Amino acid sequence: MRNIRRSMLALLALLISSVALVNVASAQANACVSLLVGAGYAAEMRVVSGSFHTDWSSSFPIGKTVCQSLSGVGDGNKFSVEVHALAGKTKTCTPDNVTRVAASTSNVTYQAWGSTLSVKCEEATVAANAERDAATMTVSPDGQKAAATAGTEKH
């Protein structure tokens, strides 16, 4: 009888610690937006799931990453992340309607770039990286003019 009680107490302790670990993991899962260097705006972000949404984050500048907890999104529910360019447009990041896995300790991180009226926000993929890199390497008309006249000026 004594061994049965010990076994039951050990099992109960194991169950309680397992539940505690799941709660810690779900509290650590976040949705994040990195505003890439080259973006033409400061931004704010939020998480949306059905009728639930977080408040907009405080604004953050180019080169910074902001995260919000996914604790308000139930396990198995779909959520999306929105990024808003201050004085500009709001964009739902892709992919959207991501399924929340509460046991996951990982973050979902999106990269945002573009201009106030042409906001881009995607999870890092080869296609997104190529488009972003092309946008940040586009030479302005003034830059093209300067390159064309470089070395032709007399000192």
Image: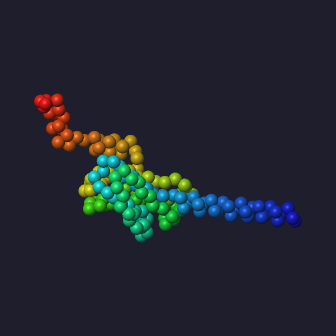
Whole-percent x, y for residue 19 in the image: 64, 63
Whole-percent x, y for residue 110 in the image: 40, 52
Relative side of 1 to 49, left or right? right
Tell me where residue 54 sits by quadrant: bottom left
Tell me where residue 85 sits by quadrant: bottom left
Residue beneath the point at 87% across and 64% down: 2
Whole-percent x, y for residue 32 in the image: 43, 56
Tell me where residue 90 sits by quadrant: bottom left
Is 148 drawn above or below residue 59 in the view shown? above
Residue beneath the point at 75% across and 61% down: 11
Is 32 drawn above or below residue 52 in the view shown? above
Residue beneath the point at 35% across and 45% down: 128
* Quadrant of the frame with the N terminus: bottom right
* Quadrant of the frame with the C terminus: top left
Residue beneath the point at 29% across and 43% down: 136
Relative side of 102 to 79, left or right? right
Is 65 drawn above or below residue 12 in the view shown? above
Identity of the residue furthest to the right in this view: 1
Residue 140 visible in the shown view: yes
